[in-house]
Image (tube, grey):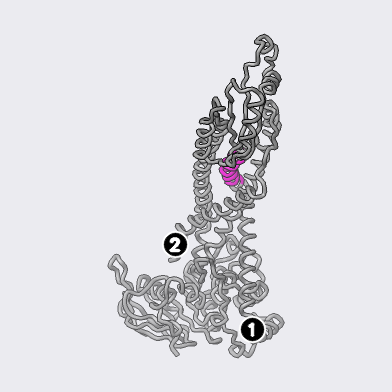
Amino acid sequence: MAMISFERVSKKYSSGHEALSNVNFTLESGEMAFLTGHSGAGKSTLLKLILLLERSSQGQVMVNDQRLSDLGRHQIPAHRRSIGTVFQNHRLLFDRTVFDNVALPLQISGYDPQDAARRVRAALDKVGLLPKERMNPQQLSTGEQQRIGIARAIVNKPKILLADEPTGNLDPYLSEEIMRLFMEFNRHGTTVLIASHDLALVRRMPCRLLTLEQGKLIRG
Amino acid sequence: MDKPGKRPSGAVPVRPAQRPPQQTKRQSAVRQQPATHAERSRGAARHKVEFSDKRRSWLRHHLGTAREALQRLQQSPISTLMTVAVLAIALALPGFLLTGLKNLQQLGSNWGGEPRVSLYLQSSLDDQQADRFSRSLLLRDDLLAVELVSREQALLEFSQSSGLGDLLGYLGENPLPATILVLPRETSAAGLSAIQQRLQALPEVEEAVLDLAWVQRLASIVELLKRSAWVLGGLLALTVLLVVGNTIRMTIGTRRDEIEVAKLVGATDAWVRRPFLYTGFWLGLIGGVTAWLLIQLSLMLIDTPARQLVALYQGEFELLGLGWVGSFILLLSSLMLGWLGAWLAVAKHLREIEPE
């Protein structure tokens, strides 16, 4: 079953810049893939289309059997809740603890606080940050902050996990550890799509590669 | 209104089967095992409890958001105090004015708000004729009450109330005519002047005077002031909206990151809006209560002098406060204004904040 599929998808900005042109690919349920290419090749745009942060100019994006063009503005939140996302610059909130950062998606979904606390601790445990749940993210290292972002992305057990340059500022050792974490989620059945320009790292992973070049998918 | 955040029973499937057969080194068996059991039983019961679950989660979220909004206000006490003070003064002014006018109106009605017509009789009529005439008036059905003031009575009252009794003594003869005070059934302005005309036309009557002029004047002054108070109230209500709106706008600015992240992980507009609406609610409530206290305090301060003033005119006077209804209206309108101000600010600015 296809979890994510792009059918002749193009994205042209009003400035005239074509970020994606005629992209076709299908990611099966439970599959894990890397999206690579130079910066500016359209990796982030592709992820934004999946998250409905942008809409395609042409073509169809299907996520979990749902045509995204059919979703109205008011259906976007529910769609985003079904996807876990790790953002490029962590996107953490420094006015609250690690625990509260991870709990945010559950609060938004209206979970019972006890249930939520249990899930948050489970997620923090998976990324190895359980002992630091009471700390402020600012007190933690970049690698740890990235892992908070990952815990937040997986805390409500999404079917799809997206990550945009999750190893951007990390040293090779930490990067690989984070990638192993993603593979572990994938083994549990989560469909994973990771955008990364770190080719050396990506090649070491036994995963499918989708390569973008100037908005075109040259390998997938 | 806002819908609660949906519990995504479908979006968050519990998949015990897909759990790893072995614990990874980071997962302690103690922590993970009971969770799986709990989830399994929850999954089975979920369909039955979904509705009450949603309601509970909705209520809990609202209470939590309300409490958090209040805590945030407490965290910046100075700016909260300033905002509340502006709101309270803006709300207290029209409230105080309207209460004052209510008192003035009450004063007017105590002072013979009922329109009376004084009939000054022809001086050729003697007491017996005057008495007979007043009895004939009693038979008319356009009059509610008739009271004869004979020439002697009139003289007595005049000398008592004016202190000019000695002077009258020098006149030798009573210069005052007999008077009949009548209370018409009709109370409208047009009806009153019609009846005054009819009474004026009677041969026994020298002059029929509608005793209403000053009461009417007071009433129209009060009416004018009241209208002005409402206009002022409208302007100040606008002020409240703007003050709350501006406060909320600044709060939105400081919480921009939070809004973006919440939207990224799937918060609905309603969810994002809610804390700000509660901030407006609290500002309105605290502002309203403070305004109420200000009004009561001001009334207490003017109570004694007002009594003294009225006592000078031999009047009886009980200073009216806001009363239950007035207090309720004050609080309700300040709540509504706070909420509405927040809503306007949020509606305008939240759409501008879209994550990228």
Q: Quadrant of residue A185?
A: bottom right
Q: Which residues are magenta?
A: B81-101
The quarter in which the N terminus of chain A is drawn is bottom left
- Per the rendering, the mark at residue B48 is 1
Give the residue number, with chain letter if any, for mark 2: B351
Mark 2 to mark 1 CA distance (whole Å): 37 Å
Query: Would you place residue A127 above or below residue B41 in this image?
Result: above
Any part of residue A137 in sight: yes
Q: Residues within 10 Å of mark 1 (few under 14, many from 20)?
A: few
Any part of residue B76 in sight: no
Q: Quadrant of residue B321?
A: top right
Query: Would you place residue B85 above or below residue B33 in this image?
Result: above
Q: Residues within 10 Å of mark 2 (few under 14, many from 20)?
A: few
Q: Chain of mark 1?
A: B
Say if the magenta span includes residue B100: yes
> Element under label 2?
loop
Q: Position of residue B81 (x, y in %)?
A: 61, 45
What is the magenta segment's predominant secondary structure? helix
Judge left or right: residue A68 versus residue A127: left
> Element under label 1?
helix
Determine the residue located farthest toward the left in the rendered image.
A16
